Amino acid sequence: AQKITQTQPGMFVQEKEAVTLDCTYDTSDQSYGLFWYKQPSSGEMIFLIYQGSYDEQNATEGRYSLNFQKARKSANLVISASQLGDSAMYFCAMREGDNQGGKLIFGQGTELSVKP
Amino acid sequence: DSGVTQTPKHLITATGQRVTLRCSPRSGDLSVYWYQQSLDQGLQFLIHYYNGEERAKGNILERFSAQQFPDLHSELNLSSLELGDSALYFCASSVDMRTYGYTFGSGTRLTVV
């Protein structure tokens, strides 16, 4: 069964430093998509970055990059130059195969705290 | 504003009651997904509708039901509410079943007392 694992319940990082949030996944599908979302204390889910299973390059979006290691089934999020506003919950998610209607499976999340 | 509208934002109700949560997807999006976020279960997929038809079901309780109307808005009905149904309910929309362009609404926070 498809599964997303985030092993870091909480992380601290100093402002302006880089931080890596871990995500491993399990799937037997050849085609899948990996996502990271940010959920601030206000509750909304904010899309950060996407990586397709066939993408050869690691995805980047501004200060966010996704370290995709397909053989290891990992999709770690790297946030460079952390800002105080980055303090939030971060969720890794995977889109299942097409015959499942494209639903997302989420990990348990990592709470990131950025220290001034 | 993400373009996905969920109402109400907050809802407080008593056990045994029934409530309806509403979601208007982003203009042009045919798919609506419902998710439940609770402290003990995390983010769980409930149900997916595509252009009015149910496409996939997750661990949705029998007390819960949903539908998508011809104008593509969707409603999630929760009945015989229990304390454990207290959660943040999200809907997300996308253009089709396979695109990665999911857009989430801001959620409805349901508190059952």
Image: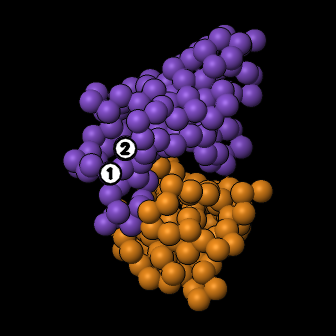
Q: Which mark is residue A79?
A: none
Residue at 27% over, 40% down: A26
- Chain assigned orange: B
Q: Secondary structure at mark 1?
A: loop
- Splitting the image into 4 quarters, where does residue A93 fall? top left
Shown colour of chain A: purple
Q: Secondary structure at mark 2?
A: loop
| Amino acid type, residue under disc 1 in the picture | Ser
Asked if residue B22 can be seen in this view, the reply is no
**Residue pointed to by mark 1:** A31
Examine the rendered structure and indicate whether residue A43 appears above or below residue A69: below
Q: Is residue A97 left or right of residue A61?
A: left
- Residue B64 vs residue A101, the one in the foreground: A101
Residue at 32% over, 58% down: A97
Q: Is residue B65 left or right of residue A85?
A: left
**Residue B38: image x %, image y %?**
50, 49
- Residue A48 vs residue A89, the one in the foreground: A48
